[in-house]
Image (cartoon, rainbow, N blue to C red):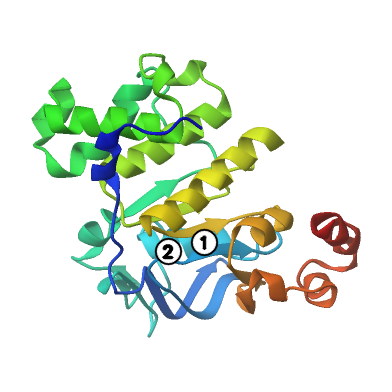
Amino acid sequence: MRRAPATVDSLSMTASAAAVASVRDVSKTFGARKALNGVSVEVGAGEMVALIGPSGSGKSTLLRSITGLQSIDGGKGVIEVFGEVVQKNGRTTGQCRSARQKLGMIFQQFNLVGRLSLFSNVMLGALGRIPGWQGLLGVWPSADKQKAMAALHRVGVADYAAQRANTLSGGQQQRGAIARALVQGAKAILADEPVASLDPVSARKVMELLVELNKRDGLGVIVTLHQVDYAIRYCDRVIALKAGKIVYDGPSTGLDTKQLIDIYGPEFEDAFWEAKA
């Protein structure tokens, strides 16, 4: 990746001393199924955490609940983001919007507007701090334009700034989504299966970029992954869910064959050894 210009330093974030997310006794029910069942967990500022588990284990539901995009069940469950209460008693609070602005969300399908240029998509990260009419008309402050180009340089796709998003590769679009989070001024990045749709080379580049933002900028990162080898390779801490409950929370190096078989079943054993190879 090319070194970013000096102006990118303005994008560096100092994470708050408050936890990125504090989840206490949270449940979420879909019909007769408990997607989350009394989950309690805290992710500190500056941590790089992977959420793993089989399909339907609750990892994406947990991530979306932290942002307030998914409501939680009523009761005593509480979710805080950087010390602000996002959800309580099954409802989002008045602090939800403020808290959400501190989180950069990265989705599996990139969540870019395909007909807009990559630059315009990245500029959308500035919408939370300018009048709505300016965003509607594309009248962007010059400082935000500079931030957008600095962010595109930072993630290695500045050469594609003028290109329509839907003409770019998946890896290029995903790096554009990360650039948008930088322009937003996010203190943490929450990524839901960000590499699931990418080829292995692009997937590694995206994961390496998330690690760089975590280590160099101090951004907290919470990422859901199906690829357990990526969780072990790139994340310091792993939280594993199964049937809506946390069954492992500790260092990625602490995962052993028995624990992974408990999480995924015996068919995982061969994949685990491939990941460790």
The amino acid type of the residue labelled 1 equals Thr
Can see residue 199?
A: no
Q: Which residue is mark 1?
A: 61
Seen from the viewer's position, the closer of residues 121 and 61 is 121
Q: Secondary structure at mark 1?
A: helix
Q: Residue at left 22%, top 29%?
A: 146
Q: Position of residue 202 (x, y in %)?
A: 62, 34
Q: What residue did someone put label 2 on?
A: 65
The disc placed on residue 22 is none
Q: Would residue 44 be found to the left or right of residue 232 on screen?
A: left
User: Within 10 angstroms of label 1, few (less than 14), some, or many (20 or more) residues?
Assistant: many
For the point 23% across and 44% down, which residue is it?
10
Quadrant location of residue 103?
Answer: bottom left
> Looking at the figure, which quarter contains the C terminus?
bottom right
- Which residue is depicted at the point 27% across and 68% down? 16
**Is label 2 in a helix, a strand or a loop?**
helix
Identify whether 231 is placed above or below 32.
Answer: above
The image shows residue 57 at horizontal and vertical percentages of 65, 65
- Please determine whether, in this image, residue 213 is positioned above or below residue 43: above
Pointer 2 and pointer 1: residues touching (CB < 8 Å)? Answer: yes
Amino acid type shown at disc 2: Ser
